Image (cartoon, rainbow, N blue to C red):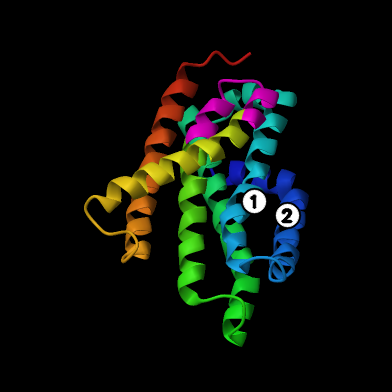
Amino acid sequence: MSGILLKDLYIAKSNILITLVCLIVIGFGLSFLVEPSALLVIAPAAATTSVFISIASDAACKWNKNVLTMPVSRAQIIREKFLLYLLLAAAGVLVSLLPCLAFLLTGTATTGDSVALYASIGISAALLAGGISLPCAYRFDPDKSQIVFMMSYIASTGIIVALVLLTNLFLPVKEHTLAAFGVVNVFSLIWFFVSCRIATVLYQKQDIT
């Protein structure tokens, strides 16, 4: 599976580097307009677009058909895409932390609690959105998959709000904000791995032409 991962990273490396550099620049630019920690919410979404570029590239060059002749199972193919998604989402968060930490160390424009909160929101949104859009990427054509990817972030926002409201029934969110979003993150992670299993089953049944 490491070979497949390296293949996707090689294909998407230029997009990934440009995206990560842009995140740093945008982070410093946001400091003059809004809370720079807000970058942590959009960073995973920006970084993970390369996953869908790789899926579209695989379909365009008929790689999905050719790889079936190799000693690689369909389950490994799906797990690799989900792993790539996780790695890129983590890279987006880590890179966007650089401007946030710079402001945090200088004591301007942000706080540790703000960084932790926005990071939690960004991570949970990325996991929820990925859990929705990745299985769909193997069911629809590339154009529709891009639409689903964008819509999945809207859906993830609604899910996060619902989870926060549900958590508030047992734990006052205003008083324990980070703990509440910890619950949301755990749910999001579980959903992501369940989605990986669902995508694997669907892909194993799919007729590759």
Give the residues in magenta: 132-147
Q: Residue furthest left?
A: 170
> Does residue 8 appear to the left or right of 157 in the view shown?
right
Does the segment drawn in magenta span residue 43? no
Q: Give the answer, above or below, for where 107 lies relative to 205.
A: below
Q: Are marks 2 and 1 in contact (CB under 8 Å)?
A: yes
> Does residue 199 appear to the left or right of 106 in the view shown?
left
Q: Residue at x 70, y 59 (%)?
A: 20
Residue 109: % across, % down: 61, 76
Which label number is shown at residue 47?
Answer: 1
* Nearer to me, 195 or 117: 117
Going by the numbered disc 2, the residue's amino acid type is Thr
Q: Residue furthest bottom?
A: 106
* Nearer to me, 21 or 69: 21
Residue 54: % across, % down: 68, 37
> Is the C terminus in the top left, top right, bottom left or bottom right quadrant?
top right
**What whole-number distance in Å separates the C-alpha atoms at marks 2 and 1?**
6 Å
Mark 2, residue position: 19
Nearest to N terminus: mark 2 or mark 1 = 2
> Does residue 165 appear to the left or right of 206 in the view shown?
left
Residue 24: % across, % down: 71, 66
Residue 72 at least partly seen: no
> Does residue 78 appear to the left or right of 4 in the view shown?
left
Q: Residue at x 50, y 28 (%)?
A: 74
